[in-house]
Image (cartoon, rainbow, N blue to C red):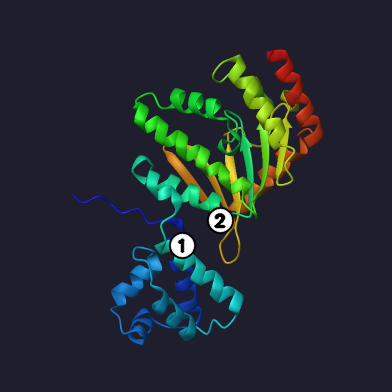
C-alpha cells in the first residue's frame, strides 16, 4: 500500500481560502473548473491541499472571485509560493515527521511566538551542549547520525531570532526547568548564562513561572502559539503522547487565554533574569 502523503498546513490553509472565496461567490466547483479549463477533481484537490495550485491558476481564480485588494492578493500569492518552495529545513525532511516540518515552517513565518515550557527550555534558546543532552535522553533508539541531524536542525532554527526582522519570542519557563540538571551541572550553568544573555535581546522576553505559584492553568504541559501575518490564522501547537496537535482559530483563542493566565503568575523579566543568575551561582 502506498504511503499517505502529508498535506502541509500551508497547502491546507491556501486550499481553505480558495474554497471560502468560491463559496462566497456562490460558485460551484465545476464552474471554477470550467473557468480554469481544468477537471473539477483537480480544482477540488487545490481546495483540500492535496495538490498545490500554480501561480497562473491562482491569479485566475483570484480574478474570478473578485479579490482586488492588493495586500490580500500578495499574501495569497506568497502563501502559494511557500507551498511550492522548498525551505532550508527540507534537507532534514527524511529525519522528521510531517507534523514537525509544519512546525519549523510556522517558526520561520511567525511574527510572534508565545511559548510555555515545563520540562525543557524552548529549543530556540538552547546551547549546543544542552540540546545534545536533551535530544540524546529523549531518543533512546536513535543512531548517532540521526541525533546529529536533529541537533543541526535545532541550531539552524535559532537563526530566525537573529535575522533583520526577527519574530518576537515571548516565553514562560517553569522554575523547575531551571533546576533540572540536563547534561550535568556545568552544562546547565552554561545554558542558563546563555538564556540570561538572550533575555536581554529586544525581541525576546523570558519570564519564569515560580514554584511558589502553585497550581496553574496548563497542567497538561507545554504549548506554542504562533501569530502569523494575514491571511494566515493564529495557531496553537501542543505535543501529546500520540503526536503533535495543531489548534487553529478560533480554538487557539482558548490557548491564548491560558497563556495570559500563566503570565499573570510569572516573575517580571528583570526578576526572572535575577533568579536565573542566582541559580547559576548555586550551580558553581
Q: Is residue 134 above or below residue 282?
A: below
Distance from label 1 to label 2 (Cα)? 10 Å
Query: For the image shown, how many numbered marks are present on the structure?
Result: 2
Tell me the residue at 40%/30% (across/down).
Answer: 147
Tell me the residue at 81%/34% (across/down).
Answer: 270
Tell me the residue at 30%/80% (across/down).
Answer: 38
- For residue 6, the mark is none
Sequence-first disc among 1 and 2:
1
Mark 1 closeness class: few <14, some 14–19, many ≥20 residues within 10 Å: some
Q: In the image, residue 155 lies at what x, y percent?
A: 52, 38
Q: Is residue 20 above or below residue 35?
A: above
Confirm or deny contact between disc 1 and disc 2 (CB under 8 A). yes
Q: Is residue 51 above or below residue 36?
A: above
- For residue 109, the mark is 2
- Secondary structure under badge 2? helix
Residue 127 visible in the picture:
yes
- Secondary structure under badge 1? helix
Q: In the image, residue 1 lies at what x, y percent?
A: 18, 49
Residue wearing tag 1: 82
Q: Quadrant of the C terminus?
A: top right
Q: In the image, residue 43 lies at what x, y percent?
A: 35, 74
Tell me the residue at 60%/74% (across/down).
Answer: 71
Amino acid at each position: 500500500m502506498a504511503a499517505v502523503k502529508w498535506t502541509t498546513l500551508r497547502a491546507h490553509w491556501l486550499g481553505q481560502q480558495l474554497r471560502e472565496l468560491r463559496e462566497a461567490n456562490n460558485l460551484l466547483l465545476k464552474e471554477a473548473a470550467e473557468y480554469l479549463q481544468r477537471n473539477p477533481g483537480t480544482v477540488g484537490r487545490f481546495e483540500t491541499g492535496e495538490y498545490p495550485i500554480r501561480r497562473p491558476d491562482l491569479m485566475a481564480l483570484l480574478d474570478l472571485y473578485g479579490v482586488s485588494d492588493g495586500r490580500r492578493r500578495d499574501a495569497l500569492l506568497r502563501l502559494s509560493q511557500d507551498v511550492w518552495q522548498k525551505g532550508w529545513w527540507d534537507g532534514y525532511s527524511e529525519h522528521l515527521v510531517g507534523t514537525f516540518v509544519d512546525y519549523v515552517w510556522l517558526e520561520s513565518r511567525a511574527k510572534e511566538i508565545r511559548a510555555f515550557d515545563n520540562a525543557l527550555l524552548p529549543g530556540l534558546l538552547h546551547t549546543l551542549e544542552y540540546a545534545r543532552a536533551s535530544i540524546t535522553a529523549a531518543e533512546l533508539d536513535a543512531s548517532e547520525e540521526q541525533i546529529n541531524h536533529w541537533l543541526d536542525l535545532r541550531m539552524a532554527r535559532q537563526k530566525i531570532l537573529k535575522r533583520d526582522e526577527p519574530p518576537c519570542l515571548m516565553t514562560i519557563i517553569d522554575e523547575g526547568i531551571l533546576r533540572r540538571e540536563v547534561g550535568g551541572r556545568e552544562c546547565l550553568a552554561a545554558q542558563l548564562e546563555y538564556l540570561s544573555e538572550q533575555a536581554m535581546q529586544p525581541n525576546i522576553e523570558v519570564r519564569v513561572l515560580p514554584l511558589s505559584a502553585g497550581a496553574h492553568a496548563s497542567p497538561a504541559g507545554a504549548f506554542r502559539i504562533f501569530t502569523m501575518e494575514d491571511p494566515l490564522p493564529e495557531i496553537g501547537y501542543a505535543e501529546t503522547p500520540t503526536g503533535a496537535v495543531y489548534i487553529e482559530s478560533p480554538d487557539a483563542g482558548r490557548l491564548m487565554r491560558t497563556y495570559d493566565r500563566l503570565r499573570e503568575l510569572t516573575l517580571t523579566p528583570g526578576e526572572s533574569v535575577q533568579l536565573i543568575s542566582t541559580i547559576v551561582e548555586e550551580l558553581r
